[in-house]
Structure formats: C-alpha cells, structure tokens
Amino acid sequence: MKPYGVWAVIAPFNFPAAILVGMSIGALITGNTVVLKPASDTPIIGYLFTEIMKEAGLPDGVLNFITGPGETIGKAIIDNHDVDGIIFTGSKQVGYKIIKGSTKVKLRSIIGEMGGKNPVIVTEHADLDKSVEGVLRSAFGYSGQKCSACSRVYIHKNIKNAFTERLVHHTKNLSIGNPLDPHVFIGPLINLKAYNNYQKYSRIAFRDGKVLVGGAVRRSDDYKYGYYIEPTIVDNLPNDHRLFREELFVPILCLAQYDDFNEALKLCNESSYGLTAGIYSNKKQEIEDFLDNIEAGVVYVNRPTSAITGAMVGCQPFGGWKDSGTTAKGTGGQYYLAQFLREQSQTIVE
C-alpha cells in the first residue's frame, strides 16, 4: 500500500476540530501531504491545529493551511493537477460540484460525506419516554446543524398523538440562548445564510403544514446579538413534500404517521440520502426487519441519548450510502485509512 501524494482536505464548520483533524490525520498518517482548507466560518481551529502539528515536529510542507472563500479556494484545489485526492465533508451540492469538476482535470480519489435526511421510526411497541428524549436530542441538539440530525419521524398511528404531545411539550421547554451557558440547549445558527434559510423553510411549513411549535426567530434583548431561532415541529405535510426530502441544516423536524411497518421502511428509504437512521421498538421482528432493510450507513436501535446522532470512533464507523457518501466506508472504521492509499502488486524474479 502506497500513499497517493497530495490530498486536499475541505472541512465543514459544524465540527471544526473533530472532522478537520480526523480527515487531515487520515491523510497524513498514511504518508500523504495535505492542503488543508477549513470552512470560511471557522478558520481559527484549523490554524491552531496546523500550528500544533508544526510544534510537534511535522516537517515544513507536509501540512499546508489555506483559508478563504469556498468558491475561490475550492476551484483552485479542483483545477490543480498536483492534487491527487480530495476529502471533504459538506453538502450534496458541493460534493457533486467537486466530483464533476475533478473529472475534467484528472482521475483522482474522492472521499466525500455529503449530508443526510435522516429518519426515525417510532413503532407502537416503542418506549415513549425513550423515543421522545432520543428524537428531541437528535433533532435539536447543536441547533439541528448536523448532517446526522433527525429531520423526519414516522410514528405509528396508535401512538402518534401521545408521542407528539410529549415531544411538543419538551420542545417548548428547551432553553434558547448563548451556547457558552451550560444551561442552554439551543444556540444560534452559524451565519446569516442559515438564518435566512430557517425563515424560508418556516414560512413553507406554515403554508403547507401545521406548525406545532416554533417557527419564529428571536430578536429581542440579547437575542439580537446572534442568529437565534426556535426549534420547530411541523405536521400534516405530504410525505413527498420538499421539507421531507431536502437537507435543511436547521432545527425543523417533520412528523408523519404510518399504518404498516413496511410502509414506514419504504418512506425512510425513498430518500436520495442514506446517512443515519433509527428505530424505537421492543418487538424483535420489527428490529430485525429494520436492520435488514434500512438503507443507511449508520443505524441505531432504541438509543435514548440521541436517536441517530453521534458515533464513537473505533466502535461506530460513520459514513453514508447513496447521496450521503462517495465511498460508503465510514470514518473511524477498519476500511477508512486504506482509502488514502493505493495498492501495488510487486513481483520479484531472481
């Protein structure tokens, strides 16, 4: 196994240390050099990481830090013939742009994690308290700014009202404010674009569905110093509505009910994404059917702390299927590092 040469690392804003460091070290530890481009909203951690690596003794030219607008720097990376591989975490749109642009330059390895539209099934055999807590944390933790966030929930008709009532109640009690305050659960969105997107999607939710809680921004008092919004739950949308299909990256959760378990599985898998998915059920057959048929790279069963967000490196490889990933091999898994290497068969005749 031999290194490719030069890898470009394009990192997201939402985990500005964990993802950036993980991708960079993956390329470096396998013998490659790196051109590191952090998200425009979060460049400082990338810079500090580069300084730490330099202090640790990494030779000059092995890790190269560059920051600037994604459109400008990204294009320069894609167009550069000396870049042998690109690893990035970001949106589906950016991912397709990188892939399409690269094909015009040279054949190169591309490792991409491109978001999700992540479903949870809550069956009539679920523990309601556990499922409400898990969905709440998964949908609204980090203000919904996770590619793994729960964005749609399919609930059995027999428990829909009970589940929804509890979920709405707990959502109303979530604290919104400065994330430096340990008692705050919902912090601000990352930038003005996300803030405007939230308002656009909220208007669509009010127009086409029934907003059960949230849907508004906070502007008074200290809220005027950040892009503060309310966690939002919307019901009564058609299952093929854009809010059920598009990755929003804001704390808006769509609910729907189902009659038949196979129908719920079908609705989960109809998405073009396949990153994370979860189920709450105490019925063995439902769990087995879910695990056998769900089209996602990271799946969870009856997880109370967060329905489908979060993965422990070395135990839960994190990567998506379909439009959620280019390789379907998860970060932190046994196949991850091999992606930064190319195989060479050597035969010696004496």
Image: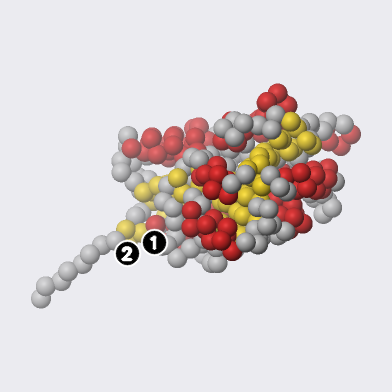
Q: Earlier in the sequence, mark 2 or mark 1?
A: 2
What colour scheme governs how the chains and residues are painted in the rendered image of this protein? secondary structure
Quarter of the image for the C terminus: give it.
Answer: bottom left
Number of other residues with Cα within 10 Å of mark 1, as a class: few under 14, some 14 to 19, many 20 or more:
some
**Is label 1 in a helix, a strand or a loop?**
helix
Residue 335 spot, x, y in % from top left? 42, 62
Residue 30 location, quadrant:
bottom left
Asked if one can make out residue 268 in the rendered structure from this viewpoint, the answer is no
Residue 338's tag is 1
Along the horizontal axis of the image, is 25 left or right of 198?
Answer: left
Q: Residue at 44% across / 60% down in the picture?
A: 336
Q: Where is 223 relative to 318, above or below?
A: above
Q: Quadrant of residue 222?
A: top right
Name the image quarter holding the N terminus: bottom left
Q: Neighbour class for label 2 at 10 Å: few (<14), some, many (≥20)?
A: few
Label 2 belongs to which residue? 1
Instruction: Compare residues 306 and 101 and report the one nearer the observer.
Output: 306
Q: Residue furthest left?
A: 350
Q: Could you tell whether 157 is left or right of 93 in the image? A: right
Do tag 2 and tag 1 residues touch (Cβ < 8 Å)? yes
Instruction: Name the element at disc 2.
Output: loop
